[in-house]
Image (tube, helix red, strand yellow):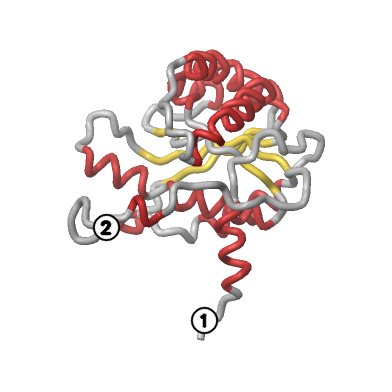
Amino acid sequence: MSQFDLASVDYILKTTRSVRKRLDFSRPISRDVLEECLEIAIQAPTGGNRQEWEFVFVTDNDKKTAIADLYRPVFSAYYKSPRKEYPAEDPRAKSAPRVADSAAYLAEHMEKAPVYFLPCFHGRVESQMPAAQAASYGSILPAVWSFMLAARARGIGSAWTTLHLAKEKEAAEILGLPADITQAALLPMAYYSGENFKPAARVPAKELTHWNQWGSK
């Protein structure tokens, strides 16, 4: 028999969303809570148990604004670029306008988030083979997801963003990051408003699953 309350575990896994419009910018997040979530997060698996990760929390208003100012023009170009179109019955077709609208809201208000969370790792991957790049990112992303889950369980929302990486060097200068440190993402964080989140509409897993060879459903 499982030692877990599967209903609770499944619920938090299915309802941890990228939170944008429901971030409550008025409530600070204590350092103790963030560090507690991070202690949980670093139990995540990491390639070769190397643990070559570093984590940066940004609470300084000037630094948050400077990074948001880097993010906004990149987001604007992305927002104006052509988007993939889906059939009307595809869940992504219905959610795309809502997601785009909430992403634009976050870009406009990003610096109001009380905390930015930037997961980083040692080394640069630009010249590495694909397998090495996958290992580097695969060694930190599980910890970031664990961090998001731990935060969600404590009433804190986050939004996974990566567009600032187009200006990664400039962001590194703002934060004093060494040249051999790679930023993996930027998560604005705040307590979320409202009571609950619902599972998102997704393409059914069985439509994306192959057994033993491609196309064998």
Please report the residue visible at 55 percent of the width from the left and 58 percent of the height from the top.
13
The numbered disc on residue 217 is 2
Q: What crowding class fits label 2: few (fewer than 14 Cα within 10 Å), some (14-19), or many (20 or more)?
A: few
- Report the side of 71 relative to 49 (left or right): right
Please state the horizontal and vertical placement of residue 215, each as a whole percent of the image: 22, 51
Residue 186 visible, this angle: no
- Mark 1 vs mark 2, CA separation in Å: 30 Å
Against 35, is 66 above or below?
Answer: above
Against 73, is 59 above or below?
Answer: below
- Report the side of 2 relative to 112 (left or right): left
Please state the horizontal and vertical placement of residue 2, each as a whole percent of the image: 52, 81
Residue in the foreground of this view, choosing between 185 and 125: 185
Give the mark, 1 or 2, whose residue is nearer the N terminus.
1
For the residues carrying marks 1 and 2, which lies nearer the camera in this image?
2
Residue pushed farthest bottom?
A: 1
- For the C terminus, the quadrant is bottom left
- Report the side of 206 relative to 211 (left or right): right
Please name the amino acid that badge 1 sits on: Ser
Residue in the foreground of this view, choosing between 139 and 53: 139
- Report the side of 25 relative to 70 (left or right): right
Please report the residue visible at 73 percent of the width from the left and 44 percent of the height from the top.
192
Q: Secondary structure at mark 2?
A: loop
Q: Secondary structure at mark 1?
A: loop
The numbered disc on residue 2 is 1
Residue in the foreground of this view, choosing between 153 and 194: 194
Please name the amino acid that badge 2 sits on: Lys
